[in-house]
Amino acid sequence: MSARKPGRPVFESMLKRIQKGEADGIIAWHPDRLARNSIDGGRIIYLLDTGTLKDMRFATFSFENNSQGKFMLSIIFGYSKYYVDSLSENIRRGMRTKLEHGWLPNIAPAGYLNDAESSTIVPDPERFTLIRRMWELMLTGTYSLQQILDIATNQWGLRTRKRKRIGGKPFTRSAIYEIFSNTFYAGIITRRDRTYPGKHQPMVTLDEFDKVQQLLGRPRLARPQVHTFAFTGLMRCGECGCVITAEEHTKPSGLHFVYYRCTHRKVTPCSQRPIPLRDLERQIIAFLESITIPDEFHQWVLARLERWGDDEKERDTTSRESLQAAFDAVNRQLTKLTKLGIRELISDEDYAKEREALLAEKRRIAQRLEGNETADSWFEPARLLVSFSNRAVSWFSEGDLEIKRLILVVAGLNPTLLGRQLSIDARKPFRRWSKTPKIPAMSSILDDVRTLWLNQDQEFLSTVAALRRLSELVKSSGIARAA
């Protein structure tokens, strides 16, 4: 019976046939092709000792079935095991070195590519931007994984990377979940419960990643499975605090009516009555009208943004100096911690814990410093917000269910229903105007937008992500006066 580097199933089958008497010899290229661990080598020598295995023939090694031959065979098997163990250790050491240098030693995840020439990982020009847009949809808090998957697959045409025999197919739901759970996209490589700062280009910030993990960790968060109703899961009952749901009724005449009501999931009885959809939308429009800015102010703000975009090129030095000071402080703490560890004034466990926390804070500040490099990028969200403040009512009146839902998410905060009356707070930086706004008030809103953007306020960034998606929908739907 011949054997050529047998795998585990082939090796086991070979030994079973020998034990059954179907064969009493083995032909192989070299003894190290047969046994690369102590158990396999011992089993073969045991078969030789018992006479079940009579002879062995090799192309590059002479063997005689006697005490000297079996002794030399065991030495060869030992060398083979040593070779495998050394090779495994060298591979692990190489992988550790690559991780410590900030590079993933495996196949790059979706949205990235392995660069063979530089042995690094670079953004995938076809998928990086699309997967970043998926993160933005998730950050809005209004889309489920399935909805994001449907949009990416059907509207954007996202497919897996084509390889020799696999790929070129739509992503699965589990693949989308893996993307949103992988710290690699935030610039962190996680390996066996240890983290390493990656040198690849992050797709999201650590703050954005943390927020998505919070959303993924809220299985009870009410989100519509399909866009049958626009506002389910966004409002709360003002009496008992339960989520507001929707239901459709069909009259004997065939007319359909949609009502929003409390889910009544608490033991305490709730006396709130359902509200018809038309009354609810009428109140939402009234709220949107209260935050609307007139056309002349809309044009004035856009013109001012254009001027600022031409004149303001320098970064906000105060914010950057503050971040740089914090970055330097963390470095000093790391230096002090290292000295404590060298002098054995702190336990290994406490040292590892403190060092991990300081490195995480250092990475977070470094990302904010990098984001501060492009201070003028706040103009784009400012334009979106200003256009929204001027056109939200018309978009809501003419939009479909998804557009209406996003409009309420963008502008409204803590929507509450009590006595069929909708109470909504304006989400920052929007304001409710009791009278026609003045120019100074418009300027203060722009200052708020700039401050929120430079501070990377997570609630504001989620609003911007929802605004970008809303802008896409408005343009594709052809709504009048779309931006």
Image: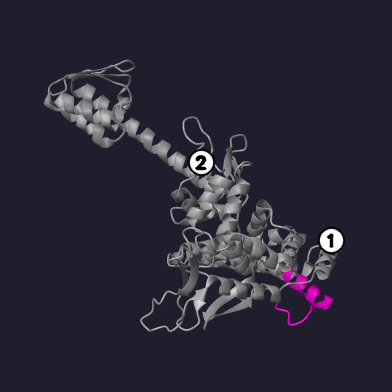
Residues in magenta, as a range = 430-449
Residue 373 position by quadrant = bottom right
Q: Residue at 58% of width from left, 57% of height from top?
A: 137
Is 455 placed above or below 149 here? below
- Front position in the image: 482 or 205: 482
Q: Does the segment drawn in magenta span residue 81?
A: no
User: Can the viewer see residue 440 in this picture?
Assistant: yes
Q: Secondary structure at mark 2?
A: loop
Provide residue 23's location: percent of width, then percent of height.
Answer: 17, 19
Provide residue 294's location: percent of width, then percent of height.
Answer: 79, 71
Q: Which residue is mark 2?
A: 107
Residue found at the far front of this picture: 253
Foreground label between 2 and 1: 1
Q: How many marks?
A: 2
Is 237 placed above or below 121 here? below
Q: Which residue is mark 1?
A: 306
- Front position in the image: 333 or 373: 373
Q: Secondary structure at mark 1?
A: helix
Q: CA distance from mark 2 to mark 1?
A: 44 Å
Provide residue 378's location: percent of width, then percent of height.
Answer: 74, 62
Residue kind at label 2, given as amino acid type: Ile
Provide residue 7's location: percent of width, then percent of height.
Answer: 31, 30
Is 282 placed above or below 110 here? below
Q: Relative to 321, is 309 on the left or the right? A: right
Report the quarter where the N terminus lies. top left
Q: Relative to 54, is 356 on the left or the right? A: right
User: Can the viewer see residue 345 in this picture?
Assistant: no
Of marks 2 and 1, which one's residue comes earlier in the chain?
Answer: 2
Report the quarter where the C terminus lies. bottom right
Residue 126 position by quadrant = top right
- Front position in the image: 103 or 239: 239
Q: Residue at 51% of width from left, 59% of height from top?
A: 227
